[in-house]
Amino acid sequence: MKFSGSGRRLWTAAIPCMTFLLLSTNAAFGSGGGVEVIPDKTIIVQIVNFIVLIFLLNIILYKPIRSVLIQRQEKINGLEQSIESCTKDVVEKEDAFAAGIREARSKGVKEKELLLAAAAEEEEKIIQEINEKAQANLSEIRKKIEKEAEGVRVSLSKEVSGFADAIGQKILGRAI
């Protein structure tokens, strides 16, 4: 252990005091036999010894342990705060992500509706063009049919008298 400053001064003063206290207490109990408590000048030495021991233990043992405990508590508090901030960040990012997804979905739905509307308009245009072409083709076909019908009517009207004579001969069984 390395001590500097006031710690070194305490050790230099404490070692002779503890040596004196140990020697004085051994002399008091060296007589053997039963334990007899007689208050005398050693009680003052023991009180001083106790006070010095408390002081030294406070400096050597308790303060370092307290400082380690305080550092540990500060570290735990710091970690708890970082956990809370990370949790808040995660919640904020999840909310932002969910909002982004909702926004993207709404944009997608709007674009889909616009595309469906444009497709419906295009479909109507195509159907209208097909109907116009069909009407034009139908009118051409009707004109062709009318021309052919007129041509057949003219050719049949020339042959009607011949068909009428042939039918009449077959019905009557003789020439008309």
Image: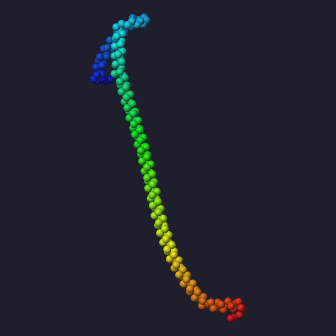
Q: Quadrant of residue 52?
A: top left
Q: Quadrant of residue 15?
A: top left
Whether residue 85 is situated above or below residue 98 in the rendered picture? above
Q: Give coordinates of residue 87: x percent, y percent.
A: 42, 40
- Residue depicted at x 29% and y 16%: 13
- Residue depicted at x 34% and y 11%: 45
Q: Give coordinates of residue 73: x percent, y percent.
A: 39, 30
- Residue depicted at x 44% and y 56%: 107
Tell me which colouring the rendered structure shows: rainbow
Q: Nearer the viewer, residue 150 or 25?
A: 150
Query: Quadrant of the image for the N terminus?
Result: top left
* Relative horizontal placement of residue 67, taking residue 111 as reference (left or right): left
Q: Give coordinates of residue 14: x percent, y percent.
A: 31, 16
Q: Nearer the viewer, residue 160 or 14?
A: 160
Query: Quadrant of the image for the C terminus?
Result: bottom right
Counting the numbered discs, the total is 0
Q: Give coordinates of residue 151: x percent, y percent.
A: 56, 86
Whether residue 105 is situated above or below residue 88 in the rendered picture? below
Q: Quadrant of residue 152?
A: bottom right
Residue sitting farthest toward the right: 173
Visible in this render: residue 5?
Answer: yes
Whether residue 26 is situated above or below residue 101 in the rendered picture? above
Visible in this render: residue 22?
Answer: no
- Residue depicted at x 32% and y 12%: 20
